[in-house]
Amino acid sequence: MKSATPYAVQTVAHSEQTSTPIVPDGKPGVVPPAPGPTSPKGKLPTTSGKVFFLGADGQPHWCAGTAMMSPYRNLVATAGHCVKDTQSAGAMLDKWVFVPGYSEGTTPWGLYVGKQAFVHYDFDVYEDYDRDFAFVTVYNGVVLSSSGMLTDSGRLVENVGGQGLAYNQTTTSSIDVFGYPAGPNPDGTQPYTGQTLERSYGKTFNAMAPDINGEQLIGVDSPFTGEGSLGSAWLYNYSNGNRSGYLNGITISVSDTDGDNRYDTSVSPYFDGEFFGVYSAAKNLWSGTIV
């Protein structure tokens, strides 16, 4: 993992705010979160972490991921192109593993190996970035024992908590964004290292990104740079007390919208009933142990 670099596929897109409304395809809905552990103390979510995998170049890379509440407590959300390899005929990215709470090379809650990935049909077949999201079921965590053996550390959400889910919501709200930005701004400044979880807060709005055919996206005011930010969680109604909220967006790209050579906007697919449908397909599968 130490040799891995931030995934640099489709990190930047020209996006712009639009007045064209996004019409929900059904009634608003939510899935309640499962609060994380009370220790260690802090305001950042224990559910956020890095997903590591091998890219089309055969090299290790990473995106951000989020532990999600589900019946089997084994689900991770991230960007679709952090699961589906859009650089090599649509294969799935190999050697996929989630590390919640990643910080400075540490793995405080163990490693969770991906078992099965779920993406929307339109992203799988047409690479439609309006559907650039994914859910991955993971095996029980593994940790290294004092004897040097891998041992089962239990189910993901039972260890770190799980974020809730909100869909068919308004596109104008306030959102906390959590991720691991690492890359430079266009002007060469590099405000983040990618080694610790970062947080930004901003207003959301309707957006579009013509160069990736993103017609119904949402944007958020955020200074996160592109490399390292893919898969970052947008949490609505986030509580510092129990470190949980409702996933209402996933970063798929960033933009410099005011032309000052610094990124100021992150974009995400809009979460509608079809998003909930992909979640529903993924949430009911048990994955078990890998040890």
Image: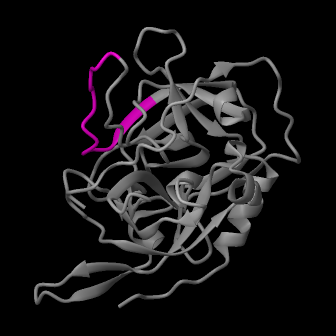
How is the rendered protein coloured? one colour
Whole-percent x, y for residue 225 in the image: 40, 30
In the rendered image, the quadrant that contains the N terminus is bottom left
Among the 4 quarters of the image, the one containing residue 19: top right
Among the 4 quarters of the image, the one containing residue 216: top right
Residue located at (33% from left, 71% from top) = 111
Report the number of discs: 0
Residue located at (28% from left, 32% from top) = 192
Residue 32 position (above or below residue 229): below
Residue 60 position (above or below residue 25): below
Is residue 198 in the magenta section? yes
For the residue pair 147 and 59, the one nearer the viewer reads as: 59
For the residue pair 158 and 79, the one nearer the viewer reads as: 79
For the residue pair 69 and 213, the one nearer the viewer reads as: 213
Question: Which range of residues does the magenta coloring cover?
Answer: 187-200
For the residue pair 119 and 141, the one nearer the viewer reads as: 119
Whole-percent x, y for residue 254 in the image: 51, 30
Tell me: 15 left or right of 280.
left
In the rendered image, the quadrant that contains the C terminus is bottom left
Q: Main secondary structure of the magenta part?
A: loop
Whole-percent x, y for residue 161 in the image: 46, 63
Tell me: 136 left or right of 125.
left
Is residue 193 in the magenta section? yes
Q: Residue furthest left?
A: 147
Whole-percent x, y for residue 154 in the image: 39, 81
Residue located at (65% from left, 71% from top) = 283
